Image (tube, rainbow, N blue to C red):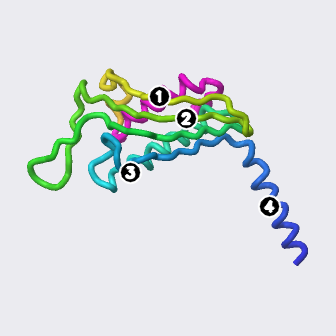
């Protein structure tokens, strides 16, 4: 019995101690039902939020230093392209045009161990989004929005970038 308690204490220390040194991103989607365009249906809006949240978390692991926390409030999303209903069937077709760039409005605050480092509110957009060569090869539905976030993270938090590419 005593051995089990000791093991539980050791495991708790091992699990919780390093947690304070990890970098983290906290994402909230504020008023997502009023976004300009985050998908036509509730399920597509939830899919958009999940994809962007996961991407922001990956970027946080890549760019933030241990002990930093980035809080992001997504205030508006306007996906690249425009939904155009198909003549037959319930699905929609998203058509990309130069005049329909992706746009994400967000507010952020960066802290390190409770100390405020930086904050702001920005509207991210790229009128030349269709010229992104890596996007042409991608089948990711949110490739243009993720490219916006990649660029913003790299410009705003250049402190630490871990190269996640495989080296053979």
Give the mark nearest the N terminus, 1 or 3: 3
Q: CA distance from mark 2 to mark 1?
A: 8 Å
Q: Which mark is residue 122?
A: 1
Residue tagged 2? 108
Disc 4 is placed on an element classified as: helix
Mark 1 or 3: in front is: 1
Q: Judging from the image, what secondary structure is the residue with disc 3 in?
A: helix
Question: How far apart are the alpha carbons under marks 4 and 2?
Answer: 34 Å
Residue at left offset 51%, top offset 35% = 107
What is the spatial separation of the Cα atoms under label 3 and label 4, in whole angstroms? 35 Å
Q: Which residue is mark 4?
A: 11
Whether 155 is drawn above or below 139: the answer is: above
Question: Are circles 2 and 1 on residues that touch, CB within 8 Å?
Answer: yes
Q: Residue at image x 60%, y 35%?
A: 109
- SS state under label 2: strand
**Magenta region: which residues?**
139-168
Mark 3: give few (<14), some (14-19) or many (20+) Cα within 10 Å.
some
Picture coordinates of residue 35, whole percent (x, y): 35, 43
């Amino acid at each position: 019995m005593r051995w089990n308690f000791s093991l539980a204490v050791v495991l708790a220390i091992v699990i919780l101690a390093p947690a304070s040194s990890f970098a983290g991103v906290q994402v909230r989607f504020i008023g997502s039902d009023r976004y300009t365009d985050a998908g036509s249906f509730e399920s597509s809006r939830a899919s958009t939020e999940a994809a962007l949240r996961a991407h922001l978390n990956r970027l946080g692991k890549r760019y933030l230093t241990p002990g930093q926390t980035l809080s992001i409030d997504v205030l508006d999303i306007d996906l690249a392209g425009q939904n155009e209903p198909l003549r037959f069937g319930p699905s929609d077709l998203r058509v990309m045009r130069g005049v329909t760039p992706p746009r994400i409005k967000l507010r952020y605050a960066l802290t390190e161990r409770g100390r405020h480092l930086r904050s702001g509110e920005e509207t991210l957009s790229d009128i030349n989004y269709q010229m992104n060569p890596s996007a042409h090869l991608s089948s990711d539905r949110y490739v243009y929005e993720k490219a916006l976030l990649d660029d913003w993270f790299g410009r705003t938090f250049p402190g630490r970038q871990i190269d996640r590419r495989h080296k053979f």
